Structure formats: structure tokens, C-alpha cells
Image (cartoon, rainbow, N blue to C red):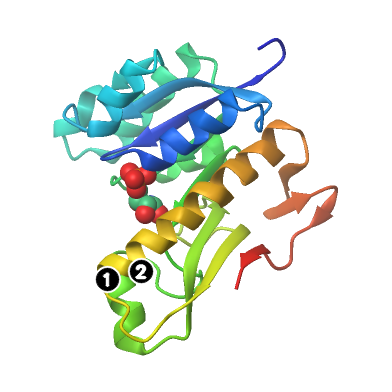
Amino acid sequence: MQGALPFAVLISGRGSNMLALARAVDEGLIAGRVAVVISDQPQAAGLAEARRRGLAAEVVETAGGTDRAALGHALTAILERHDAKLVALAGFMRILDAGFVRHWQGRLLNIHPSLLPAHRGLHTHRRVLAAGDALHGCTVHFVTAELDAGPAVIQGRLAVQPGDTEDSLSARVQQLEHIIYPRAVGWFAGGRLGWKDGAAMLDGRPLTTPVIEGA
Ligand code: GRF
């Protein structure tokens, strides 16, 4: 598509959010195109799926190493080769170094399976159940140096039901993820969403609270 914003999706596994983004592009919901899908895991199911769809798909080379700065440099080299103007983390299970985050600041989004700032980190569904939370969901946020702590853009919310399990929550949260991530990337590609002085901006105004979808 002419003038479409090239964006990259970084994955480590299944890649269902990557697919939701690719579908939203195909449906004309995002004025962008998937420039490249990058994985640290050569065997990631999402990588094969991306190739099947005809998308550029690459494995970041220092995947075996533990040097975060080297990973960041390798990622940036791939991203720049594909002219990515936005990076969407979608289940990318590596911690990114501060240099990478600084370089891409304001152009780096993540999706996290909780209502941030609640439940940063892993095993969010289990922790929601253990805490007896009434509400759960997912958050798209700009990435900053602190893990899962950057400005939130949009949240998908659902009510936890009696009898919910980790699996049932995971399935329902993913459905919401596939709605809110394309929406956020669509806003960015359409010039509505941006970053200014450490804040997420939507339609020219700082987002003091995220946009809410669902319960
Ligand atoms: C999602 O639940 C996302 O919130 C988290 O990792 C998972 C990725 O799932 N960051 P998928 O690979 O997109 O299916």
C-alpha cells in the first residue's frame, strides 16, 4: 500500500497477535504494512505462519547469546534494513537493553496480559486468580526502560467469572488482545497516536488513563 507505515512485529512463539495485526492490515484497518516479523526462536510457530503469508520473516542472530546490547544492535540492524517505523512486541520473550529502548523510544509498543500497572511480569492469569481480582485483561503500552511500566495506550477489560481457570482467562484475554493491538497500531499508523515528553499522546492530548475496551 502506498504511504503505508512499515512496522515490525517481534515474536518468540505462537504469534497470534502478529497474525491479528497482519489481518487488520489486510482488512484495511491499519494504514500500515508488516515490514518484517522477527523472532529470537527459529522454531517459533509464528515465524512459519508469517512466511506462509508471504511476510518477510527473520531470526535475530544473537539469539543464543545472553548479551543484551548485542541483541539490541542485531535487532536494530534488521529493523533498519526493513525501514521499520514502529516496532510492535508481541510475545517477544527477551529483555531489551536500555540502548535499544532509548533508540526506539516512542516507536516501541508492547502488549501485556494484565491490566497494568497490576501484575507486571509473567504468569499473570495465575496471579489474577490467586489475588481474587474481579477484573482482568490486557494492556498495550509504550515501552520504557522499566519492564511493563511504560505509558498505557489501551486496555481490554473483562470480568473474572466464578470457575475461571488460567486457560479460560488466557483464551478470553487473547481475544481482547487481538482487538486492542490492531487498534493501537492503527492509531499510530494513522498519525493519531504518538509520544511526547514521556507521555502517550492520542489525538494531540496526553493519555492520562488508557482507552478502555470491554467490561
Ligand atoms: C500474549 O498473551 C501477550 O500478551 C504476551 O505474550 C503473548 C503472546 O501470544 N506478551 P501470541 O504469541 O501473540 O499468541
The structure residue drawn at horizontal position 26% and vertical position 66%, both measured from the top left corner, is 167
Q: What residue would you read off at disc 1?
A: 166
Disc 1 is placed on an element classified as helix
Please give the name of the residue rendered at 56% of the width and 54% of the height, measured from the top-left corner. Answer: 141
Q: Can residue 206 be seen?
A: yes
Neighbourhood count class around disc 1 (C-alpha, 10 Å): few under 14, some 14–19, many 20 upward: some
Q: Residues within 10 Å of mark 2 (few under 14, many from 20)?
A: many
* 7 with respect to 89 (left or right): right
Q: Nearer the viewer, residue 109 or 68?
A: 109
Q: Which mark is residue 169?
A: 2
Kindly identify the residue that appears in the image at 70 percent across and 68 percent down.
209
Q: Which amino acid type is marked by label 1?
A: Glu
Kindly give the residue lying farthest to the right in the view shown.
Answer: 204
Q: Amino acid at mark 2?
A: Leu
Q: Quadrant of residue 166?
A: bottom left
Residue 10, percent from left and from top: 39, 34
Residue 207 image position (x, y, % from top left) = 74, 60
Q: Nearer the viewer, residue 144 or 110?
A: 110
